[in-house]
Amino acid sequence: MRCLVTGATGYIGGRLVPELLDAGHDVRCMVRSAGRLRDQPWASRVEVAEADAADAVRTGEALDGVDVAYYLIHTMGGGADFAAADRRAAATFAAAAREAGVRRVVYLGGLAPDEGLSPHLRSRVEVGEIFLRSGVPAVVLRAAVIIGSGSASFEMLRYLTERLPVMTTPRWVRTRTQPIAIRDVLRYLVGWAAVEGEVNRSFDIGGPDVLTYADMMRVYAEVAGLRRRVIIPVPMLSPGLSSHWVGLVTPVPAGIARPLVESLRNEAVCREHDIAGYVPDPPGGLIGLREAVELALRRIREAKVVTRWSSASTPGAPSDPLPTDPDWAGGSLYVDRRARRVDASPQALWAVIESIGGERGWYSLPVAWRARGLLDRLVGGVGLRRGRRDPRRLRVGDSVDFWRVEEVEPGRLLRLRAEMRLPGLAWLELSVHRHRGRTVYGQRAIFHPRGLAGHLYWWSISPFHSLIFGRMTRNVAAAAERGDTAEDLEVLSSRSRADPDAVTAPVPASGLSGRSPRAASTRHGPR
C-alpha cells in the first residue's frame, strides 16, 4: 500500500513511519517543513509532501495516489480555540481524502466515556466523528495512557514516581485506566494498512491491565527498584492546579500536562476488543504494564529513545526562520558574537558542541540556567527540563531543554531556536572553523525583539552576557581541550539514573587557562 503519514515529526508518527517501511509499504510523509525530516534515519526511504492539514489544495496534492492515510495530528495546550482549529483541519483533510479517492483513513484518538469529557478528550471525539461521517472508510483507534520511552504519559509517570517518595495526590490517581504499550499501538496502526474490505467504525484499544494511576506508580516503583511510594489522596486539587504541580515536578510543561491530567479524571477502560477480529493479538498476548515499563526504561538506559513527546513542535513556539545577516530587513536585530581559539582538533570541539544541554548542561552558571528555566515554567513555557533525546547526537527538530535544533551541519554548525517565553525570537549558534591552521570556536546569540518589551528585555539582560556567554565560550573550549567525550557522557548518564534531580556543572566556572574571547555586541537597526 501507499501510506500517507501526517504528524511524522511527532512521537507516534516518527515511530510509525519506519514500521510501515519495514512492513513493505510505500510511505509519504506530510509535514509543514520538509527540513524537519532531513536527519531521520529513514528520510531517504520516504516521499515528503509539504502541506498544512488546513490547506485544502496542498493537502489534496499530498493525498494524491494514497491508499491509506494516517491522521496523527492533534493539539496539546494550543489555546482557547484549539478545538475549532482541530475540527477545521480534520474536516479539510477528510474532504481532500474523499476527493483523492483514499481507501481508508486511520485516526488515533482518546479512550473516552460517553459524558463528562474534558475539552481535549471532547475534541478527540469530535475529530473521530468527522472522519466516520466523511464518506471515506475510517478506523478510529481510541487509546488511554500510552506507555513507551519518551511518551508524555510515561515521562509524567516516571518523574512523579521517582521524585516523590511521599506524595499528596488529587482524586484522579484513583480513577481506573487501561494503559497500552507503544509497541501494541504501532502494531495496530500498521495492521490496518493490510486489512481488506470497508470498515468504518471506532475501536477501543488497551493493554491487558486495568488499574488506577496510583497502582501504575507503584508498579513503576517496583520495576525501577525504588522504595514503595506513599500516596495520600486529597480532594481539593483541581486539574488546573494538578497540571502546574506536574509541570514543576516533571519535564512535561503545564500546558501539555493539563490535557493529560484532565483525561485521567474519567475512567478509561475498553468496552470491547473487536479489533482482534481484524488485527489479531500476537501469540504471546498484549504487553502488560510491567513489561511496557521495563522496555521503556531499557530504551532510556541504552539511549535508544527514537522519538520523544517533545519531538513535536511546541504550541505557541516561534517558527520563524533565522533572519539572514547582514541583508535582513525585518527591523532590529541584536547579536552577541564571541570566538575563541581552541587547542584541540575540530572533531573534539564538535563532539562537545553536539553533546551540549541535557545532563551535560550549558557550561556556565548552572544556577542561572535553572533559574531561567523555572521562570519560563512559571509563565507557562516549556522550561529547562525537556533534556535531550540522545546524549551524543542531534538532528534537526530535536528539542534540547528550552531550545529546538533548527540546523545541524555536522562538524561545522549547530543552530538552536529558543522555545522559552520571550518578547521576541532568539537563536543560539555554535560553530567550528579553522583559521591559520588553528581550531576556532564561534558563538552567536541572536535576538529579534517584538515591541518595546523586546527591546527592554535585551537591554536588561545585556549586562549578564559577559558572565553567561563569556564563561560559556571559555568552558566549551576547555572541555574540548580536555577531550570531554563519550566517557564523560557515560558518567553523567549513570549519575542521572541514580539521581534524576541531579543537575551537573561539567566544567568549573573559573580557574581555566586560555586567552580571553573576542566579544562584540552589535545592533542592526531598522532598515
Image (cartoon, grey):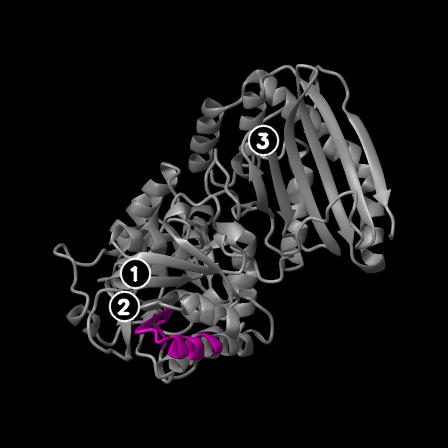
Q: Which residue is mark 2?
A: 205
> What's the amino acid at mark 3?
Ile
Instruction: Look at 24% across and 54% down and name the residue there.
Output: 23
Identify the amino acid type marked 2: Ile
Label 3, label 2: how many angstroms apart (C-alpha)? 43 Å
Which quarter shows the N terminus? bottom left
Query: Are there few (<14), some (14-19), or many (20+) residues within 10 Å of tag 3?
Result: many
Q: Is residue 501 above or below residue 12?
A: above
Residue at the (29%, 72%) spot, across then down: 269
Residue 91 in percent (x, y) is at 46, 79
Circle nearer the N terminus (1, 3): 1
Q: Secondary structure at mark 1?
A: helix
Residue bearing mark 1: 185
Q: Position of residue 359 (x, y in %)?
A: 52, 36
Q: Classify mark 1: residues with Cα within 10 Å, few (<14), some (14-19) or many (20+).
A: many
Q: Nearer the viewer, mark 3 or mark 2?
A: 3
Q: Secondary structure at mark 2?
A: strand
Magenta extent: 92-112
Above or below: residue 307 compared with residue 414: below
Q: Are marks 2 and 1 in contact (CB under 8 Å)?
A: yes
Q: Nearer the viewer, residue 47 or 369?
A: 47
Q: Which residue is mark 3?
A: 353
